[in-house]
Amino acid sequence: MGADLSHEKVQDTPAGDGSPPQSTPRFKTAAARIRPKGPAVGIDLGTTYSCVAVCQRGKVDIIANNYGSRTTPSCVAFTDRERLVGEPAEMQVGLSPENTVFGVKRLIGRRYEDSLVQSDLSHWPFQVVDGGSGVIKVQVLYKGMEKSFYPEEISAMVLSKLKQVAEAHLGRPVTQAVITVPAYFSDAQRQATIDAGAIAGLQVLRVINEPSAAAIAYGLNDSSQRKRKRNILIFDLGGGTFDISVLTVQDGIFEVVATTGDTHLGGEDFDRRLVDHLTQEFKRKHKEDLSQSKKAKQRLKVACEKAKRTLSSNVTAIISIDSLYKGVDFHTTVTRANFEDLCSDLFQATLHHVERALEEAGIKKSQVDDIVLVGGSTRIPAIQRLLSQFFDGQDLCKAINPDEAVAHGAAIQAAILTGHRYQNLQNLLLLDMTPVSLGLETVGGVMDVVVKRNSPIPTKETRNFSTTEDNQNSLFLQVYEGERTLTKHNRLLGTITLNGLQPAQRCMPVIVVTFHIDYNNILTVSAMERCTGNHNQLTITDTRGRLDREEMERIVHEEEEYRAQEKAEQEKVEALNSLESSTLQLKRVAVEEKTLDDRAKRRVLEMCEETAAWMEGNQRAPKKEYEERKRELEDVCYSIITYFSMDGEKPSEEEGRKSKA
Ligand code: AMP
């Protein structure tokens, strides 16, 4: 590798001016305007579930949401009245599967024509469409109108929810976060994740690889093992993605020596196998094809996911769904052996990636000291068994909660990036790697690799190029990512043209091409004619279907509006509740107040009944109306109670108000 390599030191406090290394949102966000008050959080933005954590005074807290869950479904539902995120969205999925969006991590930063997107199309219960020029959009009915959203927007809704969860826990605004992504995420996917954070009002301090985050958590959890160099294999099998990383750790210093994986392997694939199997069983038993109904399919999917979890601790799981399709109930039992058999090839496939990672790391399996399990799907006994057998019976590390390890590590990284120095965070160094090779097309369509896969980042590599014809006045460069020799098998990231070259014989001009990969694994390519300084820079993000600036501004604005609407809706519900409880309270006072004469009692009760009837017919009135109604009710009733209380026993104004409260 070149001489410009530098390593990512996660203990580094913000450089120079005290500001942390910045990600690159391309517009002003709400976060940028608000002075950060709460601590920066770590977010594991998962395919199926997400998790938020905070590290304060050297201690990491996984933050539970308002349902008491430490992970939140990465799910957003659109109804005719509101937008739901997390548990409430997941709970109503059976009612309206086509308007319940999940798993957008599979779509974010991808193009519609991407083969992975195409192969997924038939599995989404919601509409995934080409929103123009291959940009993916998700189409739903929201408040009775057709609406389409970019995957970034949906992810932003999940991030926004996690932000609220953290703010409720911390009692302060949260505006900064470290977000994790699979090691295999491309530049476009990383950028889109940063954009999603910005839409949610979060300044993304850094995007880090999920296995690296788990490694940070692991290093902290196990300080006794820091003395000698150890090889750690991180086996991260979540809902939708699978990542394998080999790290070395010594004296608290982590180095990622290999990363590999599959962006399309995880718990959802296991669920799908079970769903397909039971759909066949239903057909055999009841001669009906439930796959014709999105709702039935979705209900079966939820039941299968539950059964799969059960099978991690029990050997059988019962599935019982009333009126699943055409009024037919479905009751069946799945055994662990049956489930393992259905998924055996998928389970086995994980081992091929382990082999590949070891090969890339240049170590034998006997040299792996620790095998760390990350991701909910590593709870599956067959996975654990296969992995342990592969490593000749070696014990697996389960000390880190597999669902929380990534957020845990991200929270530590966030604390470090915002300048927190605690004893147990010292000497923590993380060298992150590029997930894929990057290069330029040369003569004959051959890929000339400039930055090799698994190079530590950030990194800067340069290559000298020249012209192929006399007096050539421009140079056209094509930037690719991929591991194949011919560029036609790799992925074109973008092109860059350097115009206005000085006339010269072929091969004479020196064009210096620089590939720069930043902390977030984001690539910038620049080309400069050495003798003139004439240069051009490739803004890869602009050529890769990222949302343009105006579009982002619109989305951010829209998201702010959604949040404002939701807040207004929430306040309205609170005002209605407050009026209701005031009515009930006054009713109780009228019934129980012994000093009140009968006429007054009757009048107060009448007014309360009237208000209750009005509320019944006005469930969607403006907040102001509820407040006015409450003020009026309290004023009148309070006057009556005060005035008509029998002499000497009239409650004072203060007492009257207290009893209302
Ligand atoms: P993650 O992306 O790490 O949150 O993992 C989510 C995936 O883990 C989902 O597919 C879950 O169904 C799966 N999962 C969670 N708990 C279990 C369990 N006990 N047994 C099997 N799979 C599980």
Image (cartoon, rainbow, N blue to C red):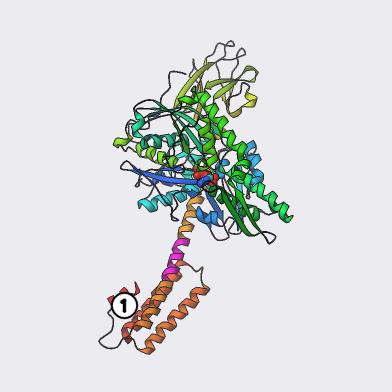
- Residue 250 is inside the magenta segment: no
Q: Residue at x 39, y 53 (%)?
A: 168
Quadrant of the rendered structure where residue 503 is? top right
Query: Going by the picture, which residue comes out furthest to the right?
Result: 287
Q: Is ligand 1 less than 8 Å from the beta carbon at label 1?
A: no
Q: Which residue is located at x 47 percent, y 37 percent? A: 373
Name the amino acid type tagged 1.
Answer: Gly
Direction from residue 381 to residue 212 in the image, left or right: left
Q: Would you say 429 lies left or right of 331 here? A: left
Question: Where residue 72 sits: x, y (%)?
Answer: 48, 50
Query: Which quarter of the picture shows residue 652?
Result: bottom left
- Nearer to me, 134 or 48: 48
The main secondary structure of the magenta stretch is: helix
Q: Determine which residue is flagged by label 1.
A: 656
Magenta-colored span = 569-579
Q: Quadrant of residue 23?
A: top left
